[in-house]
Image (cartoon, rainbow, N blue to C red):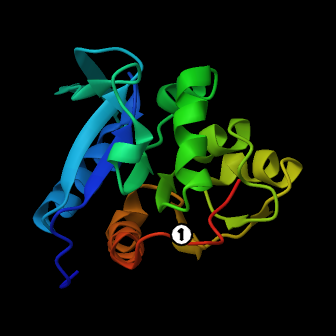
Amino acid sequence: MSQQVDGKRVAILATHGFEESELAVPQAKLDAQGITVEIVSPEAGEIRAWAESEWGETYEVDRSLDEANSTDYHALVLPGGLFNPDALRQDSRALSFVRHFFEAGKPVGAICHAPWILINAEVVAGRTLTSYPSVMKDLENAGAKWVDDQVVVDNGLVTSRKPRDLDIFCHKLVEEIHEGRHKNQVT
């Protein structure tokens, strides 16, 4: 990741139970590229991570969904875990926030179980994605093509399977942010 992307702003949408590395690693890698990163969550305050097999650290929320506006950001990151995407896919405000990034052609990164959110936002039909293997059938039932690769890029949508894929996920995400809007990144 040698290309700086100064001046860009990225939202990480998460709530309690996100997989810690799937928020912390992209946050650090994007910050190192000169990108301003803000954590957006359904509620203000703090959210607590899940760190593989137990509760992890707490993270300060920068903006609640009621305060955040998708037009203020150049890209969106969706960390996985089990609890986090399951809660967000049931939150109409979160789904609307996600859909706006697709409608505007902005890059979106989703890892692990986070494609559950994309399914409920109705933005996966006709797309090629990867995810944690247990999400495969859900994606296929929603009209997506699922592949078992470390990272898949489909017109600004970057997906990966698990924390082990974070380095290549972050690299491709930065590339997509650098490229900017993607006219084929639509709902």
In which image quadrant can residue 161 be found?
A: bottom right
Instruction: Please tell me in which quadrant of the rendered image residue 13 appears.
Output: top left
User: Going 28% across and 35% down the picture, which residue do you hit?
Assistant: 39
Left/right placement of residue 120 relative to residue 96 reads right
Is any part of residue 125 visible from this angle? yes
Is residue 58 shown above or below 27?
A: above
In the displayed structure, 13 sits above or below 9; it is above
**With respect to residue 80, does 43 lie above or below?**
above
Q: Which residue is mark 1?
A: 156
Residue 88: x percent and y percent?
54, 27
Pick the front one: 158 or 9: 9
Q: Residues within 10 Å of mark 1 (few under 14, many from 20)?
A: many
Residue at 18% over, 85% down: 2
Secondary structure beneath label 1: loop
Report the amino acid beneath label 1. Answer: Gly
Could one spot residue 91 in this view of the protein?
Answer: no
Q: From the viewer's perspective, is residue 102 above or below residue 149? A: above
- Farthest bottom residue? 2
Residue 117 at x, y percent in the picture: 61, 38
Q: Please provide percent x and percent y for residue 53.
A: 37, 31
Q: Is residue 27 left or right of residue 150?
A: left
Q: Position of residue 154 (x, y in %)?
A: 62, 72
